[in-house]
Image: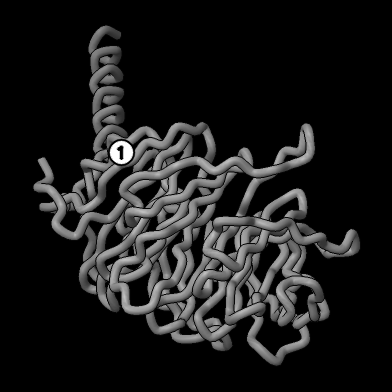
Amino acid sequence: MKRWVNKLKQLGLVVIAALACWGCSNVPSTSVNPWMPLSLETEATFSDIAFVEAEGDDYAQHGWLVGSRASLFETIDGGATWTEVPVDLDDGEKVTFTAVSFSGDEGWIVGEPPIMLHTDDGGDNWNRIALSEKLPGAPYGIKALSPNSAEMVTNLGAIYRSTDGGMNWKALVEGAVGVARNISRSNDGSYVAVSARGNFYSTWEPGQSEWTPHLRNSSRRLQNMGFTWDGNPWLIARGGLLQFSEGLEDDDWGEAIFPEFSTSWGFLDLAYRTPEEIWVAGGSGNLMLSEDGGETWQKDRVIEDVPSNLYKVVFLSEDQGYILGQRGLLLRYNPGGAEAT
């Protein structure tokens, strides 16, 4: 009997060791950490970042950062330091800003409950624009296009465009997509939306009257979708799975990629710094790098110690990028980087 007890103990130790190894990561570490953590004095989770477009500047200096708790931060030194800007809201009004966009000095901010702010002087003055009570859903994204012109999408997939500074909006798509987990816009004006539960996704291209629904191509629920450097779709599914496609219409997805097979936190967003360099961010400071278009991956283990989920990756240029986190965390791309230890 004692011999069987000892064998069971040994078997238990083997199982524990196997589980421990399953949770370990054998992904190579990056030799350099190019990200500088900034801790802003807020408990907000950041949603979006944009900079005033100045002609002739390779590195944008004047920018705006938005998020939950009606948080609005301004920088005039390229994101090195930030100052919170108070927003004039009704008493007790709780607002989450979801997106910000600039074209020249003209900027737009949207959020929920339905709210829209507009500036034509780089943000020196923000004016609130009244939105129709019949608006399907709450504003989710905004894209500044040209003077007095912007495109807005709601969290139900309603797409509108204004050419008179936000006074009037024309519907571009007649049918909504339903409650979306996230919605992304490509540079050519196409959209991809992930359903709230991650069961399916929908696409829309300029000129179409309706969204086109698509079934997900695996048993894993979708987490996020967006567009590659070339404007083709990518997806993130639960459990740290990535896939890339050649176009919106084909439903022809490449092989499943697991940058870190043992990851338990999953990924939340993906962005390209160059046509070949991809950064993928996720829960619990999870940050991965591919320098060859997704063929091989490295892990930034310096940022792994940052106590925050990393929700959004944004590159304005090859040398200017940001990763948005929670509780006031912002990562700023530093091209020189520091040796990872």
Name the residue at the bottom extreme.
Answer: 207
Task: Assign a secondary structure to mark 1.
Answer: loop
Instruction: Check disc 1: other Cα within 10 Å, few if <14, some if 14-19, many if 20+.
Output: few
Work out whether residue 227 or residue 136 is closer to the camera in this orientation and state it. 136
Quarter-of-image position of residue 305: top left
| x and y percentages locating residue 335 in the rendered image | 19, 60
In the rendered image, which residue does mark 1 sit on?
23
Task: Report the label total.
Answer: 1
Q: Quadrant of the C terminus?
A: top left
Identify the amino acid type marked 1.
Answer: Gly
Work out whether residue 9 or residue 228 is closer to the camera in this orientation and state it. 228
Residue at screen point 78% across, 33% down: 91
Q: Quadrant of the N terminus?
A: top left
Residue at screen point 60% across, 68% down: 120
Quarter-of-image position of residue 39: top left
Work out whether residue 167 or residue 329 is closer to the camera in this orientation and state it. 167
| x and y percentages locating residue 114 in the rendered image | 77, 54
> Can see residue 265?
no
Work out whether residue 54 or residue 142 is closer to the camera in this orientation and state it. 54
| x and y percentages locating residue 247 in the rendered image | 50, 86
Left or right of residue 72: residue 329: left
Residue at screen point 47% across, 75% down: 227
Name the residue at the top extreme.
Answer: 2
Q: Is residue 39 above or below residue 315?
A: above
> Can see residue 162?
yes
Left or right of residue 231: residue 97: right
